[in-house]
Image (tube, helix red, strand yellow):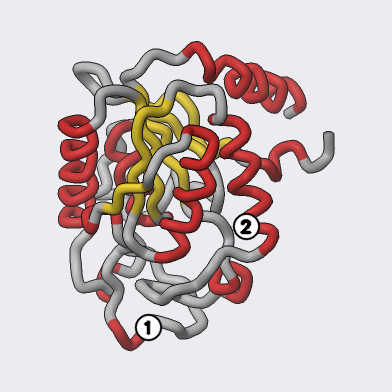
Amino acid sequence: MIFDTLSRMAIARSLVSLPVEFIFVVRHGETKANEKGIEAGPLEYPLTKKGIKEVKFIASTLSRARIKSVYSSPVYRAVQTAKILALPHKLKVKTLEELTEARIKPEFVGKKGRHHILTNPEDYLETNRQLLERSYKAIGIIKSQSRGSAILVSHGDVITGLLEDIVERKLSTEKYYVLHPDPASLSIIRMGDKPSLVLYNYHRKMFADY
């Protein structure tokens, strides 16, 4: 376990030397909805103090990386996260509707009980395939607008669908999650001829005991 942790620390230290074809994917920081198991949906939950602290850890990790743009879901918790990440690079946050939270049915919004589009598809107004299609549309927009590496801030189901597709997991037949990033976690996609996942779910809590 400690060797895995040290290995990830070495990866984090090497971020400064990454070339420009990377997208740094960050899930928004913790909110009261995360704490209480509430389905936040599009509601304007701000980050908790803990959430801000954890996002600042990722911001520090990425502070020396060559970031040229920062994109976010328009939902407040994601924008708040993105602004913290953008600050060391003196960049403005650009919002993309394509990165918004999975569109859950209104009757579940603000209520206790967490839902996921892959395991509870009947609770959503869109399919996992539609979610993935708009996620890739967002990637296409970022690639067309950005001249270098970019930060992408979004939500659990959006990021999960994207990462699981990149590692070529067949979601059409498997109705459970293998990858599901924690709040305020960093994953890195190398954008070449074929996107690949080079880092998954790096976050402050990994080092709580060290």
Quarter of the rendering occupied by the N terminus? top right
Vertical relation: 102 (above or below) 56: below
**Pointer 2 residue:** 51
Tell me which residue sits at (41%, 28%) in the image: 67
Residue designated by label 1: 108
Residue at the image point whose x is 30% and y is 43% from the top:
162
Report the quarter where the C terminus lies.
top right
Left or right placement of residue 65 versus residue 5 in this view: left
Left/right placement of residue 168 relative to residue 198 reads left
Q: How many marks?
A: 2
Q: Is residue 13 above or below residue 143?
A: above
Report the residue at 55% width, 49% height from top: 184
Quadrant assignment, res 43? bottom left
Disc 2: CA contacts within 10 A as few (<14), some (14-19) or many (>=20): many
Q: Can I make out residue 172 in this image?
A: no
The location of residue 70, given as percent across then percent down, is 37, 40
Q: Secondary structure at mark 2?
A: helix
Q: Determine crowd level at label 1: few under 14, some 14-19, many 20+ residues with C-alpha closer than 10 A.
A: some
The residue sitting at 29% across, 53% down in the picture is: 95
Who is closer to the viewer here, 207 or 59?
59
Mark identifier at residue 20: none
The quadrant holding residue 22 is: top left
Numbered disc 1: secondary structure: helix
